[in-house]
Amino acid sequence: MTSDTSDVEVAAPPHRGRIATAQRVVVKVGSSSLTGAGGGRLHRPALDALVDALAARRLTGSQVLLVSSGAIAAGLGPLGLAKRPWELAMQQAAASVGQGALLAAYQDAFARHGLTVGQVLLTADDVTRRSHYTNAKRTFDRLLELGIVPVVNENDTVATQEIRFGDNDRLAALVSHLVGADALVLLTDVDALYDGAPRRAGSRRVPLVATAADLDDIEIGGTGSAVGSGGMLTKVEAASIAGAAGIPTLLTSAEQVVPGLAGADVGTVFAPSATRRASRKLWLAHATTARGRLVIDEGAVRALTHRRTSLLPAGVVAIEGSFGGGDAVDVCGPDGTVVARGLVNYASAELPKLLGRSTRELARAYGPEYEREVIHRDDLVIL
Ligand SMILES: Nc1ncnc2c1ncn2[C@@H]1O[C@H](COP(=O)(O)OP(=O)(O)O)[C@@H](O)[C@H]1O
Ligand SMILES: N[C@@H](CCC(=O)OP(=O)(O)O)C(=O)O
C-alpha cells in the first residue's frame, strides 16, 4: 500500500480479518480436492499440502477442526470402481474402505508436524437429538482442550438415505455451530463463487457476499466433478447456516488455503447475517428435519412471535404427519406459512384429542401429565 496521504486507505474487509485471527476454525475439504485426476484414490501430495497449512495454523495456537469428505472417493480405487456408485449400499461399502485410508493418511500427515488427530464420525441424529448433540459437543471440547485436531466426516456406513446429510457442507456448518467456531472455511476445486459457471469465459469471481440479496443474480450450480456431491448450492447453504450464528465463511480452493487463512483477498467471503444466537436454538432451526407440521390459529401465532410464549394445545387447529414425542415439527400459521420450529412434547397419535382445549381442562380429563405445553418455549425457535 502506498504512503501517499492523498490515497484513501481501504481497510482490510473485517470478515477476512476475522478469518485470519479466528481462534477456533472449522475447515471443510471436498472429495474433489483430495483425489487425483481419476478421482478414485487419495492424492497424497494434495492432502499433505492441506495438512501443512492446517498444522501451521494449529501451531500458532488456533484450534483447527477438519471436516473431510473423500471416504467414498478413496474407496473407489481399492474396490475397482471407476466412478461414484449410485446405490447406497455400494457407497457405504466404498466409504467403509475409504474412511480407513483417509484417516491413516491424515494421521501420518499431521504426525509429520507432531500433531495427533481424532476421528469423529457423525450422523444427522448426532447433531439433531438433544442428548446426542450435547454429547458430541463435549467430545469436541475435550479433543480441542487436549490439542488434538478432530477429523470429522459423516458416518456414511450406517447413515440411511432418509437421514443422511449426503454432502459435508451442511455438516461442517453445523459443526461450526456446535463448537462455537469463529470462522468456517470451505475448500473445494474452484477458487471462489463465480457469478456464472466458473469455467465459462466472462464469469467473474464474487469476492464478498454481504447479504442474501447479493446472490440474486448468481447462477448457482451442481457439482463439477465426478466425486463431489452437493455443488455450489450446498456451500452457499452452509455459509448461510454458519452466518446465522455470526460465523463468517470463506469459500476457496485447497490450493488457496494459505493466503485464504491469512485473510488475503482470495475466494469468496460470506458475511454473517446475525450476531451470535444460543447454539441450541440454532441447532433446532438448522440441524433438525421436521417430521410433521402443526397448524395454529392467529392468536397462537401472535403469542409465539410477539410474546415468545410456549405453544399450548388450545392454539393448535390441525396436525400433519406422523411423529413421536421429542421430534422436531414445523409450526405454521392458518395460511400455511412456517413461523417456528420446535420439539413437540406429544406424539402425533396423542394430539387430536388435545386440540383446542385448555391445559386445565385436559389435566382434569386425562390427568396431570396432560398439563404440559405442546412445545415448550425453550424448545421453540421462531423463524
Ligand atoms: N456459481 C458457481 N461458482 C463456482 N462454482 C460453481 C458454481 N456453480 C456450480 N459450481 C460448481 O461447484 C463445484 C464444487 O462443488 P463440489 O463438486 O460438490 O465440490 P466438493 O467436492 O469440494 O464439495 C465446482 O467444481 C463448480 O463446478
Ligand atoms: N461423507 C462423504 C462425503 C460426500 C461428498 O462427496 O461430499 P463433498 O465432496 O464435500 O461434496 C465421503 O466422505 O465420501
Image: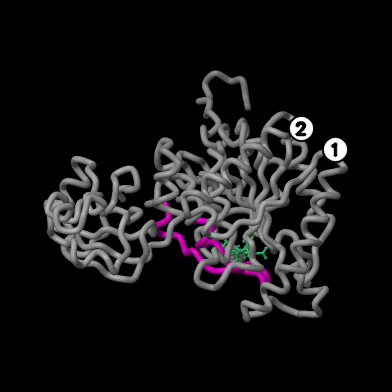
- Tag 1: residue type? Gly
**Which labelled disc corresponds to residue 59?**
2
Could you classify mark 2 by the number of other residues whose Cα lies within 10 Å: few (under 14), some (14-19), or many (20 or more)? some
- Tag 2: residue type? Leu
283 displayed left or right of 325 = right
**Which labelled disc corresponds to residue 114?**
1
Q: Is residue 103 magenta?
A: no
Residue plotted at (63% across, 81% down): 87
Residue 24, horizontal then vertical, whole percent: 61, 36
144 displayed left or right of 336 = right
- Which residue occupies the foreground of this view, 369 or 231? 369
Where disc 1 sits, the SS reads: loop
Instruction: Find ligand 1 in the image and state its quadrant.
Output: bottom right
**For disc 2, does the CB lie below 8 Å from ligand 1?**
no
Residue plotted at (15% across, 48% down): 302
Residue plotted at (81% across, 44% down): 110
The quarter in which the N terminus is drawn is top right
Residue plotted at (25% across, 62% down): 294
- Please name the predominant secondary structure of the magenta segment in the image: loop
Residue 376, horizontal then vertical, whole percent: 29, 47
Are circles 1 and 2 on residues that touch, CB within 8 Å?
Answer: no
349 displayed left or right of 149 = left
**Which labelled disc corresponds to residue 260?**
none
Please report the bounds of the magenta region as a residue range: 214-236
Residue 243, horizontal then vertical, whole percent: 46, 44
Considering only order in the chain, which callout, 2 or 1, is on the residue closer to the N terminus?
2
Q: Is residue 369 above or below residue 58?
A: below
Alpha-carbon span between mark 1 and mark 2: 10 Å
